[in-house]
Image: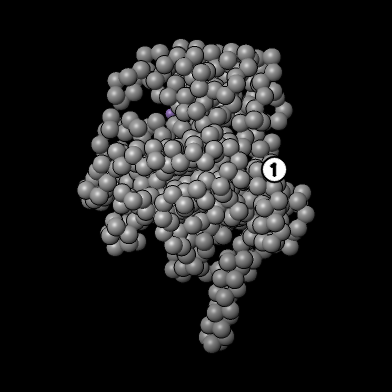
Amino acid sequence: MTARDIIVLMQKPSDADKALIEQAFDLAEKAHAGHKRYSGEPYLNHLTAVGAKLAEMGMGARTIAAGLLHDTIEDTDVTAETVREQFGEEVLFLVEGVTKLSSVRYYGSDRHNESLRKLFVATSQDIRVLIIKLADRLHNMQTLNHVPAEKQLRIARETLEIYVPVAHRLGMGRVRKELEDLAFPYVYPEEYDRVSKLLQAKAGKSNELLERERKVLQKRLAEIGLLDFKTSYRVKGLFSLFHKLKRKEWDITAVYDLLAMRVVVPTVEDCYRTLGIIHKLWRPLPGRVKDYIAFPKPNGYQSLHTTVATPNGVILEIQIRTERMHHESEFGVASHISYKEVVIDGKPAEGQSRFSSLIPSLFRPFSKPKEEKAEIKETKAAPHRDKIPRWIAQIGQTHTKDKSTTAEFVADAQTDFFSNRIFVFTPVGDVVDLPVGATPVDFAYAIHSEVGDHIFGVKVNKKLVQLDSELKNGDIVEIETRKSNKPTAKWLTFVKTSLARRRIKAALEIKEKEGGSNK
Ligand code: MN
């Protein structure tokens, strides 16, 4: 694959965009010369695959360039300085962001997955870093069979525990489905076999069936005069089928969305009209009509869903949406941010880099998160406005309950999530998230009250430190306990979490009582 193969996948690239991609390709090719993948292929194939995926998602030139260069600083002689000189501050920021993310590792414990996901998002700082990382992981999963067997399970589990939820929350349906189905056989081999066999038995010839029903529908839509539409179909992904089967006691006949047909039409009005046409053509199943256009899913997903039975005895879920909704359901947040990228005179526009330029725009539509009614009204009045994943809007919301103005909310939400929290590790790699300024005592109580109550000494990054020292993002904290050690009143002067404060006060009261009885 060459730079040109990537460029043809881009949406309306300018000459400057094209030049940037060519330049990034050239540097990647030179830097990784002789460097091979486990499969024996040139390493460059991985980089162009990532670049192509980003282009398909509709990402801009700088993100694609960063995708091509994402392993250069870590794995080759290319320095940050070179990347900055040739591609500017922003591409460097993205490449370094991806590099930093590789230090966020999944250690195989499920206890702190939520924190780890948060750490993953916080470390990336810019949604584009996450998107590059997802494209990177997608290609690594597609080539996982070449990786040494002892590494496969960890990588596949990490994919399911960290990357899939992140892709889901970013509304990136296509990446999510691919990642799930690629990881599934490695993580749950027996269940994978069982689900595959069930699906094969139930829907082995499904593509023929779907093709036949599609022709029927196409003909009817054309007859009615709806000419500008696209149809496609899909068989449910194995991993999501696995989850549904678990809920339905493995009864595959209770799964109604095994086969789905998609109809993409120009406008929202056409969506409702198409639903009417379909319900006249095929018998809808009662209670299965869902209007996610008027009421989008939390991650922003919009479509009309209905389930029908055709005269051929096929049960089909039908998803009706506009082109824009379709693009968003496939690429999610990626479809909101690419337009922000502007390349001027062959150099990326500077000065508006980092998440500061992106996150505020992601927050805006949910500026009044507490007022449900206002939010629904807003959605109805402007169905075409950018839909932002609600979880992004809700980051830090717990701390902003009494805030109502947009500016304040945006500012707070950013600082809460990206600045007011730090993420530190236990020696075995579990993640603990704490407020900025937290001390080893806060950390110890976050682990367990017994650990907090008997702190004897603390090592941060293997060095002994004071109990009141301030922890920083990424610190590895080791607490030594001794049964005889007890909290003192002085601890109350420096702890930052209310949990620690409460536990210390409780322990001091006990100590006082014990002291009294000994007199
Ligand atoms: Mn990579």
Q: x%, y% of residue 371?
A: 70, 61
Residue 122 showing in the rendered view = no
Please name the residue shown 46% across and 41% down the image: 220
Q: Is residue 96 above or below residue 238?
A: above
Residue on which disc 1 sits: 360
Q: Quadrant of residue 355?
A: top right
Q: Nearer the viewer, residue 452 or 197?
A: 197
Q: x%, y% of residue 212?
A: 34, 39
Q: How is the image coloured?
A: one colour
Q: Secondary structure at mark 1?
A: helix
- The furthest residue to the front: 223
Mark 1 nearby-residue class (10 Å; few <14, some 14–19, many ≥20): some
For residue 266, side relative to residue 377 (left or right): left
Q: x%, y% of residue 305?
A: 48, 51
Q: Nearer the viewer, residue 13 or 24?
A: 13
Splitting the image into four quadrants, where does ligand 1 fall? top left
Q: Quadrant of residue 284?
A: bottom left
Please name the residue shown 48% across and 61% down the image: 447
Please name the residue shown 60% across and 19% down the image: 13
Q: Is residue 126 above or below residue 411?
A: above
Residue 347 showing in the rendered view = yes
For residue 461, side relative to residue 295 (left or right): left
Q: In what quadrant of the picture does the C terminus appear?
A: bottom right
For residue 214, side relative to residue 381 (left or right): left
Report the number of discs: 1
Please name the residue shown 75% across and 59% down the image: 403
Q: Nearer the viewer, residue 279 or 60?
A: 279
Hey, what amino acid is under mark 1? Pro
Q: In what quadrant of the picture does the N terminus appear?
A: top left
Q: x%, y% of residue 62?
A: 59, 24
